[in-house]
């Protein structure tokens, strides 16, 4: 079904196409015309990351990470890579710490995906990323069993986005990768219909040490509409 936008006044409702009888149309949100979005070739309907990609890019601009890890390519990928490149520039407005600039800023990003989903256009785009960016390494295959090698090559990762599989994969990631994550760790799909799901249980049951946590839930979505962010600290 095609996408349309709805301008909601009061309680939101589904628009219906008379040609389709009573079948409701899928929609994004809000202006009464065809949906347009950046990085359209990466977008997959129903994956729930149409707002997440821009959010992650903004978070990268704020936190300026040096080692980024993405597990599971998707609509977030071009925003993360773009954020990596944009961080080359800083606005000098009289509010910059001169001590910060004594260190060289040379960020790297690792993307891991086993290409198990049918995302041929995204796969082609990833191949193009590798050709155009010296800061991005794409690992084709499962994430399991790679943490030790990645830590030897890159050190710990201070910005991690995980969006891969279900509870078993979340548990495996936590057990293997949590200790090589040094600061921001963000997980997708941790709530279902407004309540923490099994992915969240897998995370919390395997988290060690101290970390601040924030959940973001999109109230209009039933499943792929939530994030859980951790910021790891030595002590709270």
Image (cartoon, rainbow, N blue to C red):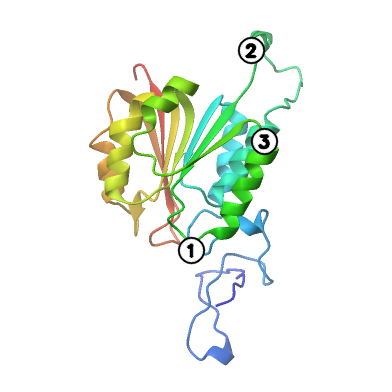
Position of residue 151 in the picture relative to residue 107 (left or right)? left
Disc nearest the viewer among 3 and 1: 3
Q: Quadrant of the N terminus?
A: bottom right
- Which sits earlier in the primary sequence, circle 3 or circle 1? 1
* Image coords of residue 17 (percent x, y): 57, 85
**Does the rendering let one see residue 227?**
yes
In which image quadrant can residue 201 be found?
Answer: top left
* Residue at 62% over, 30% down: 135
Q: Residue at x 60, y 58 (%)?
A: 121
Up-down relation of residue 173 to residue 37 (above or below): above
Residue 86 image point, x, y percent? 70, 33
Q: Which residue is mark 2?
A: 100
Give the alpha-carbon distance from disc 3 to disc 2, as whole Å. 25 Å
* Residue 171 located left or right of residue 214: left
Would you place residue 159 above or below residue 139 in this image? above
Taking the spot 66% from the left edge, 46% from the top edge, the residue there is 128
Residue under label 3? 133
* Residue named by callout 1: 46
User: Does label 3 or label 2 sit earlier along the sequence?
Assistant: 2
Residue 72: horizontal and vertical position, in percent?
46, 46
Please name the residue shown 48% across and 22% down the image.
Answer: 153
């Amino acid at each position: 079904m095609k996408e349309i936008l709805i301008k909601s006044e009061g309680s939101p409702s589904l628009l219906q196409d008379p040609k389709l009888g009573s079948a409701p149309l899928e929609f994004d949100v809000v202006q009464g015309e065809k949906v347009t979005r950046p990085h359209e070739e990466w977008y997959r309907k129903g994956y729930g990351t149409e707002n997440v990609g821009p959010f992650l890019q903004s978070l990268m601009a704020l936190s300026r990470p040096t080692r980024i890890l993405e597990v599971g390519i998707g609509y977030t990928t071009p925003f993360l890579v773009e954020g990596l490149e944009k961080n080359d520039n800083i606005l000098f407005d009289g509010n910059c710490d001169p001590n910060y600039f004594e260190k060289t800023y040379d960020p790297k990003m690792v993307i891991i995906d086993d290409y198990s989903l049918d995302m041929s256009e995204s796969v082609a785009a990833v191949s193009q990323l590798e050709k155009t960016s010296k800061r991005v390494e794409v690992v084709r295959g499962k994430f399991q069993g790679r943490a030790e090698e990645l830590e030897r090559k890159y050190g710990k990762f201070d910005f991690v986005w995980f969006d891969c599989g279900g509870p078993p994969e979340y548990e495996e990631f936590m057990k293997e990768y949590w200790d090589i994550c040094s600061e921001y760790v963000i997980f997708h799909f941790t709530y279902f219909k407004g309540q923490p799901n099994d992915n969240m249980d897998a995370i919390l049951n395997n988290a060690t040490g101290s970390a601040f946590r924030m959940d973001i839930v999109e109230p209009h979505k039933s499943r792929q509409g939530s994030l859980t962010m951790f910021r790891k600290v030595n002590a709270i």
